Amino acid sequence: MAVAPLYSGHMLSSSQLAKRLGKSKKTIDRMIRDGRLPEPNRFESNGWRYWTLQDAAEIEVLLEEGRADV
């Protein structure tokens, strides 16, 4: 079974998402835990979290609209 490369151009790690949003990784983790951000995708093989570029864009909209207050 082919597995997508971990950080291809279409996926973001937690750290990459945090950088894109101008937040810390800890803030992203807290926002997920508090329910302000949706639970990310996970790789079946190792459980690592990742976001698609579309996920990141949707999160940016949530932040801009104030629906994911920091």
Image (tube, rainbow, N blue to C red):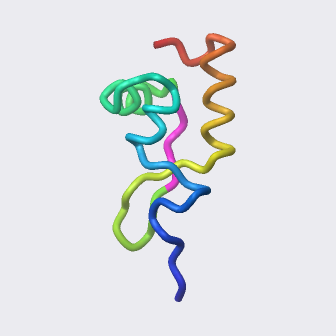
The magenta-colored residue range is 37-41
- The image shows residue 44 at horizontal and vertical percentages of 44, 70
- Give the residue displayed 50% in from the left and 49% down from the top: 12
Observer-nearest of 1 and 12: 12
Residue under the point 69% across and 44% down: 54
> Is 70 within the magenta?
no
Up/down of 47 relative to 45, above or below: above
Total marks in image: 0
- Is residue 66 shown left or right of residue 6? right
Q: Residue furthest left?
A: 26
What residue lies at 38% left-to-right and 40% top-to-bottom?
Answer: 15
| Image spot of residue 9 (x, y percent) | 58, 57
Q: Is residue 31 above or below residue 66?
A: below
On screen, residue 54 versus residue 27, left or right, reads right
Residue 63 image-quadrant placement? top right
Judged from this view, the residue extending furthest toward the bottom is 1
Kindly identify the residue that appears in the image at 46 percent across and 23 percent down.
22
User: Would you place residue 8 above or below residue 25 in this image?
Assistant: below
Please tell me whether the stretch drawn in magenta is mainly helix, strand or loop. Answer: loop
Q: Is residue 40 rendered magenta in the image? A: yes
x and y percentages locating residue 23 in the rendered image = 42, 23
Image check: 39 left or right of 48? right
